[in-house]
Image (cartoon, coloured by chain):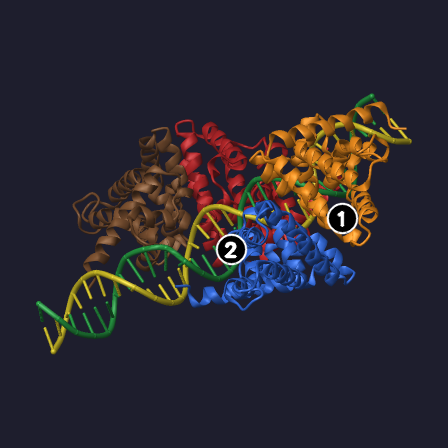
Chain colours: A brown, B red, C blue, D orange, E green, F yellow
Amino acid sequence: MERADAARNRRAILRAAEELLASHDLAEVSMDRVAAAAGVGKGTVFHRFGNREGLMRALVESRVQALSDAVSSGPPPLGPGAPPASRLAAFFDAVVELATRNVKVMAAFEQASTDRLNSPIYVSWHAHVAGLIASATPSLDADLTAHLLLGSLHSDLMLQFLKTGETDRLASGLRSMIATLLR
Amino acid sequence: MERADAARNRRAILRAAEELLASHDLAEVSMDRVAAAAGVGKGTVFHRFGNREGLMRALVESRVQALSDAVSSGPPPLGPGAPPASRLAAFFDAVVELATRNVKVMAAFEQASTDRLNSPIYVSWHAHVAGLIASATPSLDADLTAHLLLGSLHSDLMLQFLKTGETDRLASGLRSMIATLLR
Amino acid sequence: MERADAARNRRAILRAAEELLASHDLAEVSMDRVAAAAGVGKGTVFHRFGNREGLMRALVESRVQALSDAVSSGPPPLGPGAPPASRLAAFFDAVVELATRNVKVMAAFEQASTDRLNSPIYVSWHAHVAGLIASATPSLDADLTAHLLLGSLHSDLMLQFLKTGETDRLASGLRSMIATLLR
Amino acid sequence: MERADAARNRRAILRAAEELLASHDLAEVSMDRVAAAAGVGKGTVFHRFGNREGLMRALVESRVQALSDAVSSGPPPLGPGAPPASRLAAFFDAVVELATRNVKVMAAFEQASTDRLNSPIYVSWHAHVAGLIASATPSLDADLTAHLLLGSLHSDLMLQFLKTGETDRLASGLRSMIATLLR
DNA sequence: GGTTAAGCGAGACGGTACGTCACGTCTTCCT
DNA sequence: AGGAAGACGTGACGTACCGTCTCGCTTAACC
C-alpha cells in the first residue's frame, strides 16, 4: 500500500505543478521548481513520477478521469446509448471544454511527451472516436479520420483561440465539420 | 550584402544539420554537434541563426521555398489558375509529400518552436488555405477550417504513417476529407 | 559528508588540471578541457569549484597545505619555536621553493583571481609574515612590509628566474634582503 | 605619414578608453565598448593598436612619458646629478604618485599584458633602478633587487592602499625600505 | 507499545545543451 | 589606395535543466 506521507506528497506535487503551470510560463516550470513549490525534495518528484513526462501525464490523467468515466459509463449522449454521431459531437464538445479549462496542462504534456500518439490517453480517445466513426459512417477510413480530427486538439491551437476568447467558435466549427464528414 | 564566407558557412551549417537530423535521433542533434559537423565554431551557428529555433526554422524554410514558389507563381493546379478546390487538394498533396520527405526536419522545427502558429511558414500556409476555402465554400468558417486541416500535418502523425509506409493513405484520406468539406 | 564519487571526481579534476597546466600553455587550459581530461562533465567542474578562479584556488591550496601545516605546527625553524628572523627566512625559502615547483599553478591562480590580496592563502601568508616582522623588528610597519616582501613572489618573476635556472639566486637575494630589513 | 583623421581617431580612442576605465569596472571595458565610446568602428581600434595589450600599453605610455623625460633629462633629484640614493628615492616617490593617479590604467595594462617583465616600460624602469642601486651599493645584487623593489608596485597593492587612502604610507614605507637596503 | 526493515524524503551530484561575450580578423565601402 | 566600419568567426565561460544516487529518516507492520 502507498504510505500516508507518500500519498500526501503525491497530491502536493500535482497541486504545485498545476499552480505553477497556471501562473508561470511553461518553460519556467522546471522539475526543481515544482519540487520546491510542493515543499518536497526533487528526488521525491522523480521517485513518484519517474520523469517529467510521467508527471505531466499524471497531471493530464487527473483532469481527464471524469471524462473517461462519463464516456464509458455515463448517461447519453456522452455515454453509451445515443447514436454514434451524437456521441461523437458530444465527445468533441466535452474534450474542447476540458482542454480549454486545462490548456497549460495539456501543453505541458504535449511538450514533455516523447510518443504522444501512443500515450494511453490518446490511444483511448482515438479508439473511441474511430469506433464511433466506423459505426456512423462505415465508408470512411475511421482510423485515419479519427487521427485527423484529434489533430485539431493540439494545445497551440487551443491556446490561440483561448487567448481571443473564441473557444466556442472552435467547438462549433469542429462540430459542424464532424457533421459534414459523417453525412 | 552577405559576405562570401558567411554564405558558405550558412550553407555548411544547414547541410550539417540536415545530415545529422537524417542520421541521428532528434535529441542527439545539439547545436554543438551541428557546429562541429559543419566545421564551424559554435558561436558562428548562434551568430547566424540566433538560437535553435532559428536554425530549425531556416532549415524548414530552405525545404519549403520550392513549394511556396510553386504556389504563388507556378502552374496549376498548385499555382494560380485552377479552381480553388483543385488547388487545395494539390496543395495538401504537395505538403504531405514535402513533409514526408522531411519529417525529421519538420519534427525538429516543431519541437524547437515556441510559437508555431505565428511562424512565417504556418502563417503563409494558413493564409493560402483559408483563402482557397473561402472562395470555394463561402459558407464555411474559412479561417478556422484552415487551422483544423493544417492540424493534420503534425510531425508525429506524419511519422506514424511514414513508419508503416502508408503516407498515401494519409494523403488520400486528407484529400477526400477536403472534398467532403468543400462540397 | 562528501559522497564517495564526489571525492573521486574532485581528485580527478584537480589532477587533470595539474597535468594540463604542466603540459600546455596556460591559455589553452580551458575548463572544458579540464573536464574532458578528467573524464567528467563540464557542469561537474563548475558544480564543484564554482568557476575558474575556484578551481585554480583549490589547486593552489592543495599544493600549499603542507607548507601551512609546517608553519603552524611543524618543527623549527619553519614552525613555532625559532626566533622570528629565522622563521621568516625559512618561510620565504620554503615559499620560493614551493612556488618554483608550481609556477604554472601559481600563475594560473594569479591570472584567474579577481581579488588576490583577499584570497585565503595570501591573507594567511601575510598575517604570518607580518606577525614575524612585528615581533622581530617592532619599529617597522609590519603590515606594509609584509605586503612588499610578498610582492616579490609574483609568478612572472618566478618564471623569469626559473627559465634561467637561477631560483636560488632569487631565494638568497630575498633572504639577505630580509636580513637587512630586520636588522 | 599618419593621416589627420587617423591621428584624431587615435586620440579619441585613448581618451575613450581612459574615461571608461575611470568610470567602469575593469572587466566591463571591452574593446567593443571602447570603440563605441570613441565613436569609431572596432576595426579601427585594432588597426591602430593591434590588440588589447597594445591599447593598454599605449595608454600607460602616454601617462608615463613625462616621468621618463624627467628621469632622463630633468632636474635632480629625479634627473641626473643627484646622488643615486636620492634619485632612487625620488624615482619611487614619483612612480607611486604616478601609479596612484592611474591605478586603473596600470591594472588594465598588467591584466592584458602577456609578458610584463619584458614590456618596454618595465625594462626601462628596471634598468634605471638597477643602475642606481649598483652605483649606490655595489655589494648588492642590483638586478635582482631592482626586480624585488619594482614588485611592490603591482596594481592590486596600489589599489588596496588607494582604497583606504593610505598611499603615502605606502610611499614612505617604500622609501625607508630603500634607505635601509642601500645603507 | 517497542522493533525493524522497507520504503520514502531530500538534495547533492553528474552530465549535457544552450546561449552570451569578448577578442581578433576580414571584407566591403568610403574618402 | 588606404583607412573606416562592423559583420563575422571562434572558443571560453557559466547557467539551467533533467535525471540519478546515496544517505538518513519515517512509518507501518509485526512481535
Q: Specify few, some or many for label 1: CA neighbours under 10 Å numbering under 14, 14-19, or 20 or more.
A: many
**Residue B183 seen in the figure:** no
The image quadrant that residue C102 belongs to is bottom right
Residue at (20%, 47%) from the top-left corner? A70
User: Which residue is labeled 1 in the image?
Assistant: D146
> Pointer 1 indicates a residue of which chain?
D
Q: Position of residue A34 (x, y in %)?
A: 34, 48
1 and 2 marks on the same chain: no
In the image, taking residue D61 as reference, residue B112 lies left or right, namely left
User: Which residue is labeled 2 in the image?
Assistant: C49
**Residue B105 seen in the figure:** yes
Residue at (74%, 49%) from the top-left corner? D147
> Pointer 2 indicates a residue of which chain?
C
In the image, taking residue E19 as reference, residue C152 lies left or right, namely right
User: Marks 1/2: CA distance?
Assistant: 38 Å
Q: Quadrant of the N terminus of chain B?
A: top right
Name the one closer to the observer, C12 or A80.
C12
Q: Specify few, some or many for label 2: CA neighbours under 10 Å numbering under 14, 14-19, or 20 or more.
A: some
Question: Which amino acid type is marked by label 2?
Answer: Phe
Q: Are marks 1 and 2 in contact (CB under 8 Å)?
A: no
Under tag 2, what secondary structure? Answer: helix
Question: Which amino acid type is marked by label 1?
Answer: Ala
In the image, taking residue C114 as reference, residue A72 lies left or right, namely left
Name the one closer to the observer, C178 or C38.
C178
Name the one closer to the observer, C130 or B79.
C130
